[in-house]
Amino acid sequence: MIFSGFEARDFDTFSIEGLEERMEAIRSRIQPKFQAISEDITDNLTQLVGRDMHLHIAQHARRTVNPPKDTWSAYCHNKRGYKKHPHFQIGLFDDHVFVWLAYIYELPNKQEIATQFLHHFEDISTTIPTDYVVSLDHMKKESTAVKDLDLKAALERFQKVKKAEFLVGKHFDRNSDIIKNGEEFIKEVQQIFSTLSPLYKLSMHD
């Protein structure tokens, strides 16, 4: 399958009532697109970070009642899982696509990673473009533009607060032309991952 872009129907998936009904739509509409995207970007990402990267597609297996409000794919050096490791994400809520470098609360060594980031703060603050956005909670839609964020304070919180998270990347509105064009979106993802790869390498102690 060739990725031809996201469409209104993909976002409308999150309006479907019922866990099984929504999951069926996620599996049939969105997950094949995640697979198709991976075929275009995995080799490039592997070269960027110097590690074999593996695709993981969220299965939402723990859900028994409430349908998911978003869904995602993740890229990680670990074949078995991604949540306990730095990883890249591509996913969507009902109103936008997100492309992240993600550090979520399951990370066992997030304090050490945050310390590393703070130690290299000047490099990081010049690496991340000001039009990128940061989320401190992957469960929420909200994010803050880097230009409007106290980045150092966000990293200090990530370091000190057990449940704190740090995700950085870009959001694309569901009506954005870029996400409707498969080729353009792939180029944009590759550019984002390239921009963020120095942070990933730093967090992996390369």
Image: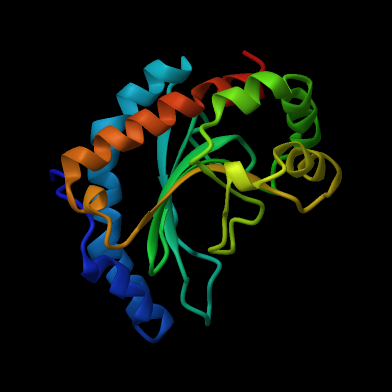
Farthest residue, direction front: 147
User: Please, is residue 118 above or below residue 9 in the view?
Assistant: above
Farthest residue, direction right: 160
User: Please, is residue 129 above or below residue 174 in the view?
Assistant: above
Residue at x-position 30% and y-position 56%? 31
Residue at x-position 31% and y-position 73%? 13
The image shows residue 101 at horizontal and vertical percentages of 53, 38
The image shows residue 205 at horizontal and vertical percentages of 67, 17
The image shows residue 161 at horizontal and vertical percentages of 84, 49
User: Please, is residue 192 above or below residue 44 in the view?
Assistant: below
Which quadrant of the view contains residue 19?
bottom left
In-front residue for pair 188/93: 188
In-front residue for pair 24/122: 122
Which quadrant of the view contains residue 97?
bottom left
* Residue 24 is at least partly visible in this image: no
For the C terminus, the quadrant is top right
Image-based side of 159 in relation to 139, left or right: right
Number of callouts in the render? Answer: 0
In-front residue for pair 70/79: 70
The image shows residue 136 at horizontal and vertical percentages of 66, 52
Residue at x-position 36% and y-position 81%? 15
For the N terminus, the quadrant is top left
* Residue 29 is at least partly visible in this image: yes
User: Please, is residue 4 above or below residue 125 in the view?
Assistant: below
Image-based side of 122 in relation to 199, left or right: right
In-front residue for pair 181/53: 181
